Image (cartoon, helix red, strand yellow):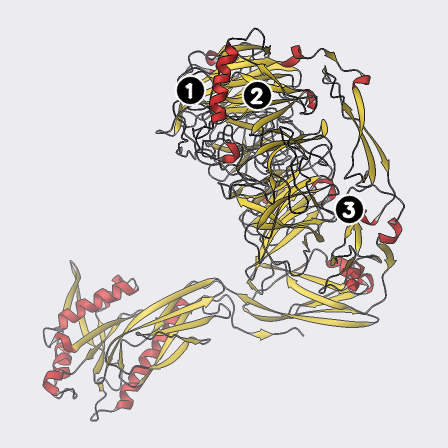
Amino acid sequence: MERGIRYCRVNAFCTLLLILFAWVPVTKTVITCRSCHLLDKWSGRELLVRMDSGVDFGKVGDKNGDGSTALFNSAGAETGQPDCGATDNCEHAHSVRKRNTDRLRSEKMPLDDKRKSMRSYGKVYSLKRPGSQGSAPGEPHHRVRRSTQGPGSPPSARSLPAFGNSTGRSARRVPRSDLRWNREERRTATSRQEELKLTSSTFALTGDSAHNQAMVHWSGQNSSVILMLTKLYDFNLGSVTESSLWRSTDYGTTYEKLNEKVGVKTILSYLYVSPNNKRKIMLLTDPEVESSLLISSDEGATYQKYRLNFYILSLLFHPEQEDWILAYGHDQKLYSSVEFGRRWQLVHERVAPNRFYWSKLGLDKEPGLIHLETKALYVTCKLQNCTDANKGKPFPGYIDPNSLVVQDEYVFVQVSTGGRPIYYVSSRRDVFTPMKLPKYTLPKDLHVISTDENRVVAAVQEWNQNDTYNLYVSEAGGIYYTLALENVMSSMGPEGNVMIDLYEVAGIKGMFLANKKQNNEVKTYITYNKGRDWRLLQAPSADLRGNRIHCMLPYCSLHLHLQVSANPYTSGNIASRESAPGIIVASGSIGAELTSSNVSMFITSDAGNTWRQIFDEEYSVLYLDQGGALVAIRHTPLPIRHLWLSFDEGRVWNKYSFTSSPLFVDGVLGEPGEETLIMTIFGHVSHRSEWQLVKIDFRSIFNRRCIESDYVPWDLHDQGERCLMGVKRVYRKLKPIARCVMGKTYSVTMISEPCDCTESDFECDYGFERRADGKCTPAFWFLPSSMSRTCTTEHTFLNSTGYRKVVSNNCTRGVMEQFTARRQPCPSRAPRGLHLVTSEGKLTATTASNVTFLVFLEEGDGSKTSITVDFGDGNAFTYSNVSSIEDGIKHIYKNVGIYRVSATAENTLGSETVLLFLHITCQLESIHLSAPFVAVKNKEVNLTAVLSPSQVGTVTYIWWFGNNSEPVITLEGSVAFTFSREGISVVTVQVSGGNTILQDRKTVAVHEYFRSHLLAFSSNLDDHNPDVAEWRLDVSRVIKTSMVQVMNPEQLLVTVLPGLPTAAEFFLLPDKQLTEGKPDKTGNSELVLSALNQNLVQFTLRPGVQITVYAAHLSAAPLVDTSENHSGSAMLMLLSVVVVGLAVFLIYKFKRYCHPFLKIQRGS
């Protein structure tokens, strides 16, 4: 399926970006919190391309599709074009950049983040001209890649051979061979009459020399129509300022400019194609100018324009219905159209980016059902009727943000509890079950790589790993996982996506390549039975020149870069095809480990048993005529006019010229399908030249159509072992001497014969580990008897033998009965291993909310075991068997409290009870600290925190006093404290309840002696009292200013008390310079009281509002001091009255009853 070649000049910035969208079957997407993808057959999903050093070409599977393209800059970042994410039927997106012929050093391009993620369909190519700069990376998805250079490559990420960038090196001197190449071009120019030539034609896009980007769509499917959108993207303005639309109806020989048909002033930004009907084209205008869609139903011949009232960020086409589309807007709103974009309606708000999926036929009840994540909930709803009444919630409770993945028959979500993630899976839309990894795996990160053939492949980074992942495989339910390969290399892509060095070989079921880190060396391993057994690759016996290579296993072997192109029409570091089983072309090195230096090209014709070196430098190799011929174009920064062809599986290569003048090649676009015989090379003659499109027709180099005698049978084997995946497979391959066209009618034929089962057809079952002798024995943590837990819901269970058959293995008889788990009747046992948890795994909930309790029973006959659940609030229910409560038990608590919830399982043989203490709380809204304004040194005072609402459940109080570095922590809302120093002390109280922490702070003046008195005010002050702390501080300051007329301000403190009617208190301090720290005997207090009683203390609150301050007569002891001549008890009595009165008032003022009391109670 890969059809293209991409070039990037070494040390130069790779200019033009070509993105191709072609709908073909794509493999499964990688799923998870982050992304990595299994690179197997193309079967649907997001496809992203990178053409830079340090950038990876990873294939992404997704089965829902869309039709956009993605542009990438020379640094590997996308230019802001849409990508295909989290979808299933996504067209291939390809990108090639145009070389800068003036400079060899690559330049960093600025980013454009206008479009972050577009899911696409349609074979569309995106080109960038020299000097163009990149845009912001989009949101890539899971992919598998290979890697030699570091974080940025996919499963086998070493940097890609970005066109012209050998192994991703972005800057190096031009080797002498490149200079020889140039001299060779000049020499061959004198003898062109004798050289081999290809039939070609060249077309220049006249008038678009300033345009620096382009997108191309080739309809294919026996169609000769090619659409090309060229654009001038202004990176200073961050928008498209010009565009041109070109259309060819003769396979690219000539093009017609369509600007007048779409509107001369219309600026186009993106091109989309329906995955189900290639005649339907969608063009998106630049939203900076206008937000519109142009739609064509005749392969781009005519268009109609439709206005949009939102800004599209991503599109998702339905896998079967050609007119159904989901569009994700910039405001996190999801829209739908059932008329191919002609009309839109809102589906849902606050949808997580790229977390929406179409239903799957045969699994979901309705074809128009949508799976989406909103506000940390997994929701399903109908396409045109997504109301609350029609919404479904397949997973009870909240999930971690951006964790929903719907892939094939599986749904995955993640829920973190106690700082550790728990991964849940649902198979065939059944109930969710925690994924069972080996007990002490303790994953830090998990990515679902593939879900094909009724099993899940997951990459798990364990607690002791940093740059590697372990591969685990599941049984059909996706629940129980066993280890397939340890320490597979990984790296981080430019957008933060994880890439795993794993490659699935196309055309050979069960065959994978992986790069494993072993003793700090990266080595390439191969498996033919889906990871059950792995071995190193045998290096070629001789090099390109016939010299013998001395390389002995296991000390020396062949290692491959497993970077694949996300674009099926461009070449990555490794390539294989469904139509050419057994042929694999890859770049790599020979030695003790994989390196990024001395990289050569290797090929195998017998599915990895033997390898040959075909080039000693990196080339882009593509498949012609369903693999009947191979095309190679060298990575070079110089202009070229030749390519190489091989008709015998890479044994002999012939040089052909494809143009009369050397051309800087930016990318190659191949005819859609496996039978490519026509290619278009995109390039330019000079830095400022127009686009040059060279159409190459390879049909002229073939003599005839292939007949039956041109084929020979080929037996698939692994070092002589023909029984692979339980069958012997015989393929039909073209003879090396046959130069004929297989054509579109050719199909890979295979004869298969089942084999008798042997131990190699079985992998270890869950809980079992393979020992050195190859036997599967229980792990130290595993109890084989626990596998009978299915008895809790069924009458029989599978008694494991420690082995399970490899998924898709077709062996028969042999040791099948010996190794296959046997179904046995459930034993009669008393209930054992009863578990009671909430669906969210939490021990707290809020009042009036639905709490879902889940009850699990590890052992016991579930059909005959009753379950009684006592909710601790006087309500209890009994269920006849375990299966009746599989979906959980819901209950609503009305009052705050700590409830003792119990579950009891009982049958005729015994019973078991489990307890859960559930905290029901109410949301804490506010806190007020009640503290005296002035406190006596070395005498205890009471501090009280008043909550609103008054009953919120269990809370913790944290008290901070002055400069103390350690707080006082209490469960009560009051505390007694003694201040030992005079001066100003700050008291802070924090209240922690649930996920809420609130605090309040007060300042306390501490003195050894003082006298105090309460103040009252004229009633008009209450009309202006908002009862807020800031107002009380300001009024206190004004009162003090009014009273200093009769005494020294340093001896006076005033505070306005909370509540109504407005009241205050003043404190009279001794003048220590006159009294030497003794109580004041001069009668200052009498002077103040006299002024108050004569209405001499007044202040103006606002113009026309005059306030009079009085001495209040509410206390039996109007004046209190702490001297020996005054009653200390009287003062304390007054303070107690004030504090208690204040507390009562505040409780009355602020209380909001969620619940009448805090209680610990149990049911009757």
Label 2: element kind: strand
Circle count: 3
Front-most of residues 507 and 953: 507
Q: Quadrant of the C terminus?
A: bottom right
Q: Relative to 589, does residue 489 appear above or below in the rendering?
A: below
Res. 204 in view: yes
For numbered disc 1, what is the local secondary structure? Answer: loop
Q: Nearer the viewer, mark 2 or mark 1?
A: 2
Which sits in the foreground, 987 or 30?
A: 30
**Residue type at the position of mark 1:** His
Quarter-of-image position of residue 1146 = bottom left
Foreground pick, 282 / 93: 93
Q: Which residue is mark 1?
A: 211
Measured in 3D between alpha carbons, the distance from the residue under mark 3 to the one under mark 2, in whole angstroms, is 39 Å
Residue 675, percent across and down?
A: 68, 20
Relative side of 303 to 406, left or right = left
- Pointers 2 and 1 in contact (C-beta within 8 Å): no
Q: Which residue is mark 2?
A: 669
Q: Is residue 348 left or right of residue 703?
A: left
Location of the N terminus by quadrant is top right
Which of discs 1 and 3 lies nearer the camera? The answer is 3
Q: Residues within 10 Å of mark 3 (few under 14, many from 20)?
A: many
25 shown above or below 811: above
Q: CA distance from mark 1 to mark 3?
A: 54 Å
- Give how far across and how far down residue 230 sits, in percent: 46, 19
Give the Cα separation between the discs numbered 2 and 1: 19 Å
Residue 806, numbered circle: 3
Q: Quadrant of residue 1125?
A: bottom left
**Residue 552: percent from left, percent from top:** 68, 43
- The amino acid at mark 2 is Leu
Q: SS for tag 3?
A: loop
